[in-house]
Amino acid sequence: MFARRAGWDLEQSDLAARVARRRAAGLPLLDLTESNPTRCVLPAAGERLAAVLAEVARDPRCGVYEPDPRGDITAREAIAAHHAAQGGAVTAASIVLTAGTSEGYAHLFRLLADPGDCVLVPSPSYPLFGLLAELESVEPKPYPLRLRDGRWHIDLDALRAAAPGARALLLVHPNNPTGSLASPDEVTELRRICRTHDLALVCDEVFADYRSPSARAGAPYTLLPQRDEAESGPLVFVLSGASKLLGLPQLKVGWIVVGGPAQLREEALARLDVIADTYLSVSLPAQLALPALLASRAELAGPIAARIEQNRALVERAVAHAAGVELLIAEGGWYAILRLGVDGTGHALDEDALAATLLDGPGVIVQPGWLFDLEPQDESGLPASHLVLSLLPEPHILEEGLGHVLAMIEAAAG
Ligand SMILES: Cc1ncc(COP(=O)(O)O)c(C=O)c1O
């Protein structure tokens, strides 16, 4: 009956089933994976959104349906001004609104790849790539990011080897969950690889505003080309949205900014018009709310950035006093990666077993590193395992949960 594309194993994962059982039994949980800002940051964002939507409801434009496939012009002008202020050469005409960044990926896969074509995706990275690609019958082909001297680097040799025949090169900047940025030299090389192999460069910049003090010098805010680099570079698509930039995932507004050589850019936009026009998926009230919400960016995103900074410092302090665990440097983003040493017999600790023990005992939810394709070894090839924590939970929850995690690691390392 169903397409092979939809032939998923619909069984809950073991960890998800354990969480559901614990919830149903009314047992306490310390969720260190929570990355929904509406559940763990501040009510002020919800209040601001309600006030803006109340104003939008009185806007006469709300009563008229005359959709533009790229989206409402005032919303696109506000987005263009935001990106221009960050150094990108952007006009409202080169922006297409989507119902979230995930839909932006879907539109781009439809635009760039035929069924069976492959797109290059970073590894480790965002676990949803697999599904987003699969739903468009596109193959994600991983290229590795490697830790060297405590920082993540793109394995450019592996990327060059994987590039022939691919349709697009995806980058998440800062990456999820490593928080890593690309150096200026890496950006130059990515642009060259894209030009050489006729790949579009797709850069997910949803976390661009969340940089840590460890961000490497010179890493660009955006991979959109400056005006004078556009003609010599590849076709570029930058993805962003209200979900992370404003901490408002419930608004369901994202966008694609198209940059690069003028002719290719215009051809891409004309084709994106057809794709977007087929769905017209972004609700008009959400679009009309965007200018006022972008104008409130500091008020909306500021508390999230402050929470992340506070929690990162908390994790740094706790890990500095713990045995058998290291905190990997993050240059940005919303996550922390703990790297765990070996057990008494020299083997990597079992990430799933640790996560299950933490849940069944003190009720702590963590994500095993394999979910993000973090390899079970360190940079010198020695066995290691990883746990990924969100930095959004309330600090007292993170502190208590992390205390249990570190005690468990110490006990497991023997
Ligand atoms: C790297 C990355 N891109 C995109 C998204 C999804 O964004 P949206 O809610 O706009 O679809 C996420 C969500 O966590 C993400 O981590």
Image (spheres, rainbow, N blue to C red):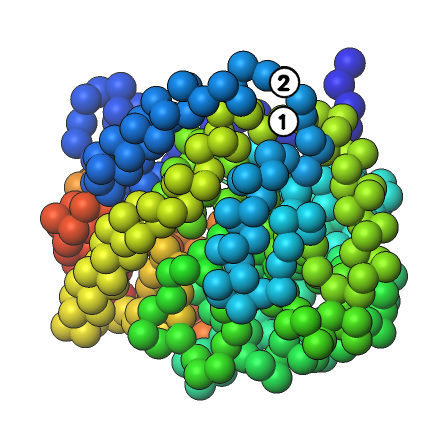
Where residue 245 appears, x then y in whole percent?
Answer: 42, 49
Relative to 171, 197 lies left or right: right
Where residue 251 appears, x then y in whole percent?
Answer: 44, 32
Relative to 149, 257 lies left or right: right
Relative to 310, 90 lies left or right: right
Residue appearing at x 45%, y 41% in the figure: 291
Determine which residue is flagged by label 2. Answer: 65
Q: Nearer the viewer, residue 201 or 381?
A: 201
For the C terminus, the quadrant is bottom left
Residue appearing at x 52%, y 36% in the figure: 253
Q: Nearer the viewer, residue 151 or 356?
A: 151
Q: Which mark is residue 315?
A: none
Q: Nearer the viewer, residue 266 or 143?
A: 266
For the N terminus, the quadrant is top right
Q: CA distance from mark 2 to mark 1?
A: 13 Å
Q: Of the residues shown, which amino acid type is indicated by label 1?
A: Ser
Please tell me in which quadrant of the rendered image residue 279 appears.
top right
Q: Of the residues shown, which amino acid type is indicated by label 2?
A: Tyr
Q: Is residue 342 visible?
A: no
Compared with 276, 269 (above or below) is below
The mark that comes first in sequence, 2 or 1, is 2
Compared with 232, 69 (above or below) is above
SS under mark 2: loop
Q: Nearer the viewer, residue 366 or 188?
A: 188
Determine which residue is flagged by label 1. Answer: 281
Where residue 399 appears, x then y in whole percent?
Answer: 15, 53
